[in-house]
Amino acid sequence: MQPKKDRIRFGCCSPVVVPKIDLPLEEQVRLVADGGIDFALVGWYDGFMSFDKEQRIEFFRLFDKHGVECLFYDEDTMLPFQGDKLNMMFDAEKLANADYYKDLPAFGGNMFLDEPGNVHFDEIGRTVREYMELFPGKLTLVNLLPMYANEKQLSGGQFSDVIDYYETQDISFQKYLDEFVEKVPTDYICVDIYPCHTDGKSKTTYKDYIRSIEIVADTCRREGREFWCCIQACGWGTSVRVPDEADFRWQVYTMLSYGVKTLIDYLYGSRCLGENVDPLLRLSTPIAGNGKKNPMWFHHRRVAGEVRTISDVYVQYRNLGAFSVNCTGETPYLRMANPYKGFDVLSDIQCDKPLLVGCFEKKNGKGSAFTLVNMTDLAKPDYAEVKVKIAGSATSYYGGLAKAEIADEAGYHTFTLGEGDGVFVTVE
């Protein structure tokens, strides 16, 4: 039984399919399904390829049983591009290697490249077209570099230089996106954006977070493609913190404000099983290397549950863009270059905290919607009380923690948003 596709979907990179752990196959799949995951990327940073074909088929059967779609990074059907095993392309001459799984119900498609440079786009476009002819209806997943990649990476790929949060020009990244759209016929654009950092003492936030989202979302809207994003579900090194529940919810609601359709957790199951590794790397993913649930698994499950209460309504609306309230020098992560203007549904907004407002219109018929997201610095957590005057005859609100008081005598609706919290509101 596969979940319906027309919904906000959560994916995950590398669930626990590691043969070294003593955990039955079905328990490994259940960890993914119970966590609120709709599709899993297997064969990439995990042990899926070390299973024999019978075990892989059993995994596919179990994914189908638990309603999880499977995207396979299958080295047996790939060819290293320019001799680089980290840049793999589909090889039609190896098509027979997919015969044992290509018709299984849980098989949703294949993972291709992660964070390629534009030097790869011509070849990616060719191999994606070839794949689509041979596997109609299946997904070819290509995940692009983030805005904070440097020019060497945007040209040659993620391993061309050390990735860092560089001072980069938007125009370079925009050119990168435009060239991908021109050459690669996907119906989505998927990128990495990981904003939850630390200075070793307290939380910090990537300073161009909203601008990163905005530039991809604007391109998706212009090109008629879905906005997909790999979001942060773990920590690594010393500067990228392990998200807590407020961090994770905040990422999700900011993305929803820009019309995101698919959110992919990086990273879901730990790939660090050795004894001599940084505990942060080994223990910060939703599922630890020993198959146990870390706190992040519970955070994800709760937020994914909230999103499922929104999803059926959310997909009826088209994102127009977003704008901010109370963006100052103390909230650089809320900076945007192209705020949406003229959203007449909200005639007045009263709030003394930084706020993100996502703007939507109904795809069919009349109607509007908006999101409100508490953008208070996560290092200084505080609630945000928002009063809005809405031009409409009726409203419904959807969210997990948000509290609402519908229309007082002056015509204002009041929403109380906790730390990292958001709400989706429809207007008829």
Image (cartoon, grey):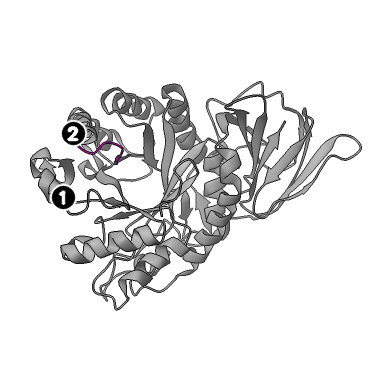
Question: Position of 140 compared to 307: left or right?
Answer: left
The residue carrying mark 1 is 99
The residue carrying mark 2 is 127
Q: Which residues are magenta?
A: 134-138
Instruction: State the residue in front, 113 or 75.
Output: 75
Quadrant in the rendering for residue 351: top right
Q: Please, what is the three-letter code of the amino acid marked with disc 2?
A: Thr
Mark 2 or 1: in front is 1
Say above or below: 12 vs 149: below
Q: SS class of the residue under badge 2?
A: helix
Q: Please, what is the three-letter code of the amino acid marked with disc 1?
A: Asp
Mark closer to the chain start, 2 or 1 = 1
Q: At which x and y percent is residue 79?
A: 11, 43
Residue 135 is one of the magenta-drawn residues: yes
Q: Residue furthest bottom?
A: 22
Check contact, mark 2 vs mark 1: CB within 8 A: no
Q: SS class of the residue under badge 1?
A: loop
Q: At which x and y percent is residue 329?
A: 60, 38
Q: Quadrant of the C terminus?
A: top right
Label 2 environment density (alpha carbons within 10 Å; few <14, some 14–19, many ≥20) = some
